[in-house]
Image (spheres, helix red, strand yellow):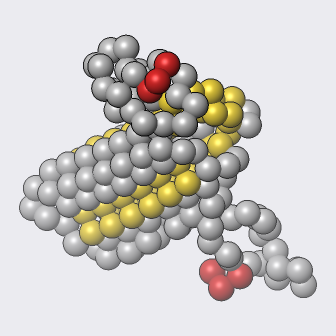
Amino acid sequence: MLSADVRVHPSAEVSEEAEVGDGTAIWNEAQVRAGARVGRECLFGKGVYVDVDVVVGDRVKLENRVSLFRGARLGSGVFVGPHSCLLNDKRPRSLTPDGQLKDLADWIVSGVTVGDGASIGGGCTVLPGVTIGRYALVGAGSVVTRDVPDHGLVYGNPARLVGYACECGQRLGAGGLCPDCGRVHDLPEAG
């Protein structure tokens, strides 16, 4: 169900059974599947894939070739960099133990949850069942294997907590103080 204010490139595929909010733009070769719920004023770049029943909040930006698999839940104001992937199967196999091709009933979905305002850099992989907190910042190329706290700054393979980030994106200093915008955050071990 698309509102009149949604822009969809002619090469994109948006299911008639998906909900897409006002002001959203979906660019070339993107695919939004049945049951997906996309908020208002989102921007989906080239080749974005949004699986069945994924939920995307308002004002979310998904760069080129982002893949959000079933079970993903993104809050509002989330950014996901190009070629990043949010996975959903902790024990991926194409076959059942008796050698049959798996179907939907054979999958155990364990989706990723991303809090409001969080940013995931380009080329990241987020493993199934992980929660990324509000305003967290995941460095480019990271493999996120465990939960990230609100405002957490993580990077690496596997991603490790190295500090905390402000809403403005700057790394927080001692006492949770942002050196750019002056906000003070009450966070454990801010630094």
Residue at the left extreme, as displayed? 4
Residue at the top extreme, as displayed? 179
Q: Nearer the viewer, residue 135 or 122?
A: 135
Taking the image as shown, residue 112 lies to the left or right of residue 118, namely: right
Please determine whether, in this image, residue 130 is positioned above or below residue 188: below
Please determine whether, in this image, residue 184 is positioned above or below residue 22: above
Q: Nearer the viewer, residue 188 or 164?
A: 188
Q: Residue at x 38, y 74 (%)?
A: 35
Q: Residue at x 70, y 47 (%)?
A: 145
Q: Position of residue 34 (x, y in %)?
A: 39, 73
Q: Residue at x 44, y 71 (%)?
A: 53
Q: Position of residue 70 (x, y in %)?
A: 53, 66
Q: Position of residue 85 (x, y in %)?
A: 57, 47
Q: Residue at x 31, y 51 (%)?
A: 76
Please determine whether, in this image, residue 127 is positioned above or below residue 72: above
Res 50 seen here: yes
Please determine whether, in this image, residue 8 is positioned above or below residue 156: below
Q: Nearer the viewer, residue 16 or 148?
A: 148
Which quarter of the picture shows residue 169? top left
Q: Position of residue 65 (x, y in %)?
A: 49, 42
Quadrant in which the N terminus is drawn: bottom left
Taking the image as shown, residue 146 lies to the left or right of residue 116, namely: right
